Amino acid sequence: MSVWRRSLSFATRPRPQFPYGTGQPIHETRPHSINPGDITPGISAEEYYQRRVRLAHKLPPSSVAIVSGSSVQFASGSVFHPFQQNTDLFYLSGWNEPDTVIAVEVDANHEMTFHMVVPPKNPHKDKWEGDKSGLEGAYDVFNADIVVDSHQGKRHLTELVDKAQHVFIDSTKPQLASLGLSSALNQLSGRSGAKPVAPIIAKLRAIKSASEQRVMAAAAKASSRAIHHAIATSTNTPFRQEKTLARFLDYSFVLHGCDGPAYIPVVASGANALTIHYTRNDDVIYDDELVFIDAGGKLGGYCADISRAWPHRGKFSEPQKDLYSVVLECNKQCIDHCVPSNSLHDIHEVSVSLLLKGLQQLPGFSHVSRTEVARSLYPHYIGHHLGIDLHDVPSVSRFDPLQPGNVVTIEPGLYIPKDDKWPKHYQGIGIRVEDDVVVGSSSATITNLTAGCVKEIADIEALIANGVTTPGVGEEQLNLL
Ligand code: GLY
Ligand code: MN
Ligand code: MN
């Protein structure tokens, strides 16, 4: 599989010729990162088609499901944020360009037609912003059956809705900035009888296909290597500031094969970790404190989500070791519960019990109650579904039994406030150990995608003492899939 990749020559490779110019990366224009047959890294054109077929099967005859994309958002003036596509649209098409609407139409005989309403190429705009895939790309690469210039989008979508007996469209305010599409979609979603489409797509997204699991495994592997790279770097040149480590992680995710970070990381020295979503990352890192990170890379649109903690100067203190061991044991046992007989909520209840039991064994904690653990010392949930979104498809209930192919995070933590109710030497320590887990059909087939990311105390201390020896860590990766 990797032969064609290894044969790339950076000195002599001819620039790929592609008649439609270069919109978002595709195999023809970026062969180093997208394999033949794939539309996005690791996900084939056939799989995107099958996703639409599965959606069509959930719709009644004579219906249309409309999903609007996003526009570029601006921070201030002409400074824009990185483009973030509506993830439902991305899931169904792989299309990652702004100002687009897609529709899956099902006729009376249950035949499916895939519509894309996309901005046309605009030589003046494209000269500044770069080529777009345009109508040609939507038709030839993204396999739309009917492609419509977004200037005619309002009329086309209105006609589709007028002729359908059942309309599925989200009522949340679409983010489309241009061409009156936003107001058109608002009107259409407000029509009587229109139902939301997101809950139907959420059920499809919750079960990850074999290809999705491979992409997520690659994102997890790259992210794990990046975190090892960061820990090993502190052997000789310890990071002095949270922000330096935060940026190093962002860089290292890309170095190891991701497209970029999946989210703004938490990089917290010592008691800063007591703020669960500490993203200021603006303190110095103290020698005697734990470094806590919650960080992950994104590859082909799929997220990794990892939390780890390590002693800045290489050796856990006894109190750090005590609390870390309780959280780690809870993490390991909860991973073993990722089977279909349990819901995420069941696993959360297990995690509270395990943390309570573990804490009660520690000196000064014998009086701790379950309520204090659940409300104060461990104030968040055991985990969430993970995928194209970091908190993937939140509409899937925590009380539903897990299903094989779900990917969930398992992330117990303990955060001891600076309150003399708790033993002094444990105060100000915050730890979470987070892994990304594919639910198995039984305990024998659970897969921990982040198992390669060091978490045993002895392994962490050895990694800091020795620097890293794992092959691939610190080496630039072109294509993990
Ligand atoms: N990184 C955010 C979370 O773990 O949910
Ligand atoms: Mn996380
Ligand atoms: Mn998480």
Image (tube, rainbow, N blue to C red):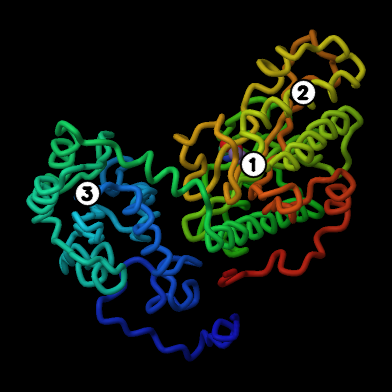
Q: Quadrant of residue 328?
A: top right
Out of 412 and 51, give the one closest to the viewer: 51
Figure quadrant, ligand 3: top right
Number of residues whose C-alpha sits closer than 10 Å to that of mark 3, classed few (under 14), some (14–19) or many (20 or more):
many
Residue shown at 75% from the left, 20% from the top: 416
Residue 454 position within the rendered picture, expressed as x and y whole percent measured from the top left: 78, 51
- Where is mark 3, residue-wise? 64
- Could you give the CA–CA distance between mark 1 and mark 2, rounded to whole angstroms? 20 Å
158 left or right, relative to 227? left
Number of residues whose C-alpha sits closer than 10 Å to that of mark 2, classed few (under 14), some (14–19) or many (20 or more):
some
Residue 58 position within the rendered picture, expressed as x and y whole percent measured from the top left: 35, 48
Out of 347 and 411, give the one closest to the viewer: 347
Secondary structure at badge 2 equals: helix
- Where is mark 2, residue-wise? 353
Which three-letter amino acid code belongs to the residue tagged 2? Answer: Ser
Residue 290 position within the rendered picture, expressed as x and y whole percent measured from the top left: 77, 35
Out of 296 and 144, give the one closest to the viewer: 144
Query: Split into 4 quadrants, where in the image is the C terminus?
Result: bottom right
Looking at the image, tell me whether mark 3 or mark 1 is earlier in sequence order: 3
Looking at the image, tell me whether mark 3 or mark 2 is earlier in sequence order: 3
Residue shown at 77% from the left, 23% from the top: 353
Which three-letter amino acid code belongs to the residue tagged 1? Answer: Pro
The tag on residue 340 is 1
149 left or right, relative to 1? left
